[in-house]
Image (tube, helix red, strand yellow):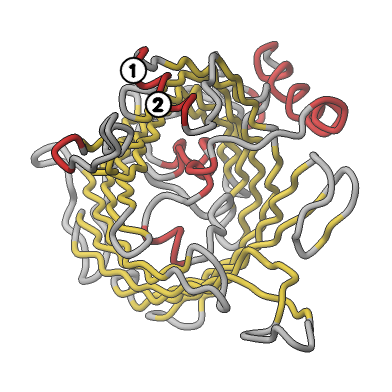
């Protein structure tokens, strides 16, 4: 086996031991929201199913299935009644060899136009509303992905992929942070079964904060009994997400894809369905029904937690809560439009939002063969030079 691939496998295997020994901090939570209306509608159960440009977020190994034409995806959503905005874009570009794919993803989650009232009160105690300014608190992520097919045969396709991600977080002119991390994953796909696993923040993702308060701002913070931060660091602990999916072909026109993911963390007990020390597991389930591979209906559940029953403040009865989601999609030729009605919390604390995403497959002019009604455009699969037993070159 190639040395790089061996080292990659070893790194994934060591994740639980490293995390349980050292890391218990949280950061970069905006990276756990999701990407693409399809994935959000299916409750985030995408590690074994994402096979377009969005796979760079869910499981980079899925990018290897973008081998015929470049694919571009865009998504936008508003959270907390429009206070927070979330934008996502991705691109997947297959190489000329046909057995590897390059990917790029961009995420931004921000709260804009936050009032800055540090100088609202004048030295004489009067209020001067002209001193109110505004700033933004924004989180950015840039993911650079690479995926490659290891084996491709009639029995199934095995691929691996990895991300290098750069994080930038900004709170007005007061604070800025830069961070970096790595993700990796594998995907095995047959006509019916799909098995995936991804390791996120394999080496932990490190954020270093720098604060830039003026002397006047420091004085106001001091007089109002607020600490003036100097520097700070954050560590995002690794996690593993194994997944399995199955594609049911109900008839010539109807199909159903079901997937289950297990989001495994190693930083102690969490409020999840399976909670232990040091491993906690948060399952995610999603389904996608399709008609002629053109119209899609989706649903999912995730984020299982123990909490109080709705409005139950007297009996203090604790029940299982979960985060539901629904969605639909439509594909015409090389264009797909997806919609999700997703909840950022659970059914007792609804934070529903509408999510819309667009995917365009950029086929070269004249290269798409004629397809039947409802079929996606197809290109001839690039010729590959096989090694023994169906293995393909690994760089």
Q: Secondary structure at mark 2?
A: helix
How many marks the image carries: the answer is: 2
Q: Secondary structure at mark 1?
A: helix
In this view, the residue farthest toward the front is 124
Q: Which residue is mark 1?
A: 216
Residue 158 or residue 356, whichever sits in front:
356
Q: Is residue 163 visible?
A: yes
Q: CA distance from mark 1 to mark 2?
A: 6 Å
Residue 240 or residue 349, whichever sits in front:
349
Q: Is residue 69 visible?
A: no
Residue density around tag 2, few if under 14, some if 14–19, many if 20 or more, within 10 Å: some
In this view, the residue farthest toward the right is 277
In this view, the residue farthest toward the left is 365
Q: Quadrant of residue 219?
A: top left
Task: Pinpoint residue 100: horizontal percent, then vertical percent.
Answer: 44, 27
Task: Pinpoint residue 201: horizontal percent, then vertical percent.
Answer: 62, 30
Task: Pinpoint residue 274: horizontal percent, then vertical percent.
Answer: 82, 61
Q: Quadrant of residue 216?
A: top left
Q: Is residue 237 above or below residue 36?
A: above
Query: Which residue sits at x=65%, y=13%?
Result: 4
Query: Which residue sits at x=43%, y=75%?
Result: 326
Determine contact: label 1, label 2, CB under 8 Å.
Answer: yes
Q: Is residue 348 left or right of residue 56?
A: right
Q: Which residue is mark 2?
A: 220
Q: Is residue 17 above or below residue 176?
A: below
Q: Is residue 2 left or right of residue 45?
A: right
Query: Which residue sits at x=17%, y=43%?
Result: 129
Residue 205 or residue 125, whichever sits in front:
125
Query: Which residue sits at x=82%, y=25%?
Result: 22
Residue 311 or residue 351, whichever sits in front:
311
Q: Is residue 284 left or right of residue 230?
A: right
């Amino acid at each position: 086996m190639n040395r790089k691939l061996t080292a990659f496998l070893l790194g994934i295997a060591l994740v639980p031991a490293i995390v349980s020994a050292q890391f218990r901090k949280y950061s970069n939570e905006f990276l756990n929201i999701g990407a693409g209306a399809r994935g959000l509608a299916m409750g985030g159960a995408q590690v074994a199913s994402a096979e377009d440009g969005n796979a760079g977020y869910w499981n980079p190994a899925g990018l290897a299935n973008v081998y015929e034409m470049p694919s571009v995806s865009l998504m936008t959503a508003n959270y907390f009644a429009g206070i927070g905005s979330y934008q996502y874009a991705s691109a997947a570009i297959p190489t000329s060899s046909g057995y590897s794919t390059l990917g790029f993803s961009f995420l931004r989650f921000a709260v804009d136009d936050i009032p800055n009232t540090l100088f609202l009160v004048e030295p004489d105690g009067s209020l001067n509303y002209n001193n109110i300014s505004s700033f933004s608190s924004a989180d950015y992520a840039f993911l650079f992905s690479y995926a490659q097919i290891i084996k491709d045969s009639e029995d199934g396709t095995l691929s691996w992929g990895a991300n290098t991600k750069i994080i930038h977080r900004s709170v007005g002119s007061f604070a800025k942070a830069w961070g970096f991390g790595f993700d990796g994953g594998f995907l095995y796909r047959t006509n019916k079964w799909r098995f995936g696993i991804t390791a996120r923040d394999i080496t932990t993702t490190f954020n270093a904060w720098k604060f830039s308060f003026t002397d006047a701002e420091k004085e106001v913070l001091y007089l109002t009994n607020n600490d003036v931060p100097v520097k700070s660091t954050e560590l995002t602990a690794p996690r593993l997400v194994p997944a399995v999916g199955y594609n049911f072909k109900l008839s010539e026109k109807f199909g159903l894809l079901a997937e289950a993911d297990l989001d495994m963390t190693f930083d102690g007990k969490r409020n999840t369905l399976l909670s232990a020390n040091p491993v906690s597991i948060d399952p995610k389930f999603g389904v996608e029904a399709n008609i002629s591979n053109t119209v899609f209906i989706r649903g999912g559940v995730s984020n299982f937690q123990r909490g109080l029953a709705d409005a139950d403040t007297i009996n203090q009865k604790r029940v299982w809560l979960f985060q539901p989601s629904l969605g639909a999609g439509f594909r015409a030729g090389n264009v797909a439009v997806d919609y999700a009605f997703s909840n950022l919390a659970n059914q007792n604390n609804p934070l529903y939002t509408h999510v819309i995403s667009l995917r365009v497959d950029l086929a070269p002019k004249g290269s798409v063969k004629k397809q039947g009604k409802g079929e996606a455009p197809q290109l001839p699969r690039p010729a590959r030079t096989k090694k023994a037993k169906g293995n393909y070159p690994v760089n």
